[in-house]
């Protein structure tokens, strides 16, 4: 699949965003100088700098440690993203499991990896595969990524349905159905947030 994204570096132009939001308010029939809207363009520019910070983030997966273990599972990593089709939020949780090959990632690095790809214009399917692809490029025997998302572009408009979407991407040893089913069972079998083995 070809990535047609413009590679962003540095910070966004907040002054330009403020001007664009001011113009948008006018086009919507609002008065950008009324009390409730004064400062709104600046707040939105600041917010965009934060919620789209993934374009300039490094997941730091190169921070790893020599350690032997069979598998590592990070469950319920919270994410927030912005649908690139309607510029409305989607959010949820991501589970990442990987089989290390002699080295393990620092625990916070998987959260950073999720933030790197979720804090940008995105679709859930690509979010899931980008995370799996980046982990699989490291020296791991396999990775599986499951994303569960709620999409405001489906709740607020269009079909106005309350369903959630699940996407899965797997690489390496998780191509084998038995191994994949075992790890999915570990991720989803809980009793008081304790895995039943």
Image (cartoon, rainbow, N blue to C red):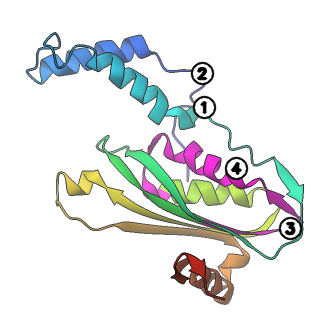
C-beta proximity under 8 Å, tags 2 and 1? yes
Q: In the figure, 33 relative to 82: above or below?
A: above
Q: Position of residue 106 (x, y in %)?
A: 77, 53
Q: Which residue is mark 2?
A: 10
Q: Earlier in the sequence, mark 3 or mark 1?
A: 1
- Residue 28 painted magenta: no
Give residue 131's mark. none
Relative side of 126 to 182, left or right? left
Q: Earlier in the sequence, mark 2 or mark 3?
A: 2
Mark pair 2, 1: CA separation: 7 Å
Q: Position of residue 4 (x, y in %)?
A: 51, 40
Q: Which residue is mark 4?
A: 109
Task: Report which quarter residue 88 is drawn in.
Answer: top left
Q: Earlier in the sequence, mark 4 or mark 2?
A: 2
Q: In the structure shown, which secondary structural element does the residue marked by tag 3 occupy?
A: loop
Mark pair 4, 2: CA separation: 21 Å
Question: Local crowd at mark 4 within 10 Å, few (<14), some, or many (≥20)?
Answer: some
- Residue 121 painted magenta: yes
Q: Earlier in the sequence, mark 4 or mark 1?
A: 1
Q: Which residues are magenta?
A: 96-125
Relative side of 151 to 52, left or right? left
Q: Which residue is mark 3?
A: 101
Q: In the structure shown, which secondary structural element does the residue marked by tag 1 occupy?
A: helix
Q: Which-is-in-front pick, marks 4 and 2?
A: 4
Q: Position of residue 153 (x, y in %)?
A: 26, 51
Quadrant containing the C terminus is bottom right
Q: In the structure shown, which secondary structural element does the residue marked by tag 2 occupy?
A: loop
Q: In the figure, 39 relative to 65: above or below?
A: above
Question: Local crowd at mark 1 within 10 Å, few (<14), some, or many (≥20)?
Answer: some
Q: Which-is-in-front pick, marks 4 and 1?
A: 4
């Amino acid at each position: 699949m070809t990535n047609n994204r413009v590679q962003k570096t540095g910070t966004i132009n907040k002054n330009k965003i403020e001007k664009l939001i001011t113009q948008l308010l006018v086009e919507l029939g609002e008065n950008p100088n009324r009390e409730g809207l004064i400062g709104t363009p600046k707040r939105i520019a600041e917010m965009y700098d934060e919620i789209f910070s993934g374009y300039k983030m490094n997941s730091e997966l190169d921070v790893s440690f020599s350690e032997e273990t069979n598998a590592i599972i990070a469950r319920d990593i919270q994410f927030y993203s912005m649908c690139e089709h309607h510029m409305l939020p989607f959010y949820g949780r991501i589970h990442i499991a990987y089989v290390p090959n002699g080295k393990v990632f620092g625990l916070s690095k998987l959260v950073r990896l999720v933030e790197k790809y979720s804090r940008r214009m995105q679709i859930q399917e690509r979010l899931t595969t980008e995370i799996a692809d980046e982990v699989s490029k490291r020296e791991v025997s396999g990775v599986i990524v499951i994303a569960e998302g709620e999409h405001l572009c489906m709740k607020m408009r269009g079909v106005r349905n309350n369903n959630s979407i699940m996407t899965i991407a797997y690489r390496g040893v998780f191509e084998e159905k038995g191994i994949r089913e075992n790890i999915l069972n570990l991720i989803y079998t809980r009793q008081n947030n304790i895995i039943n083995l």
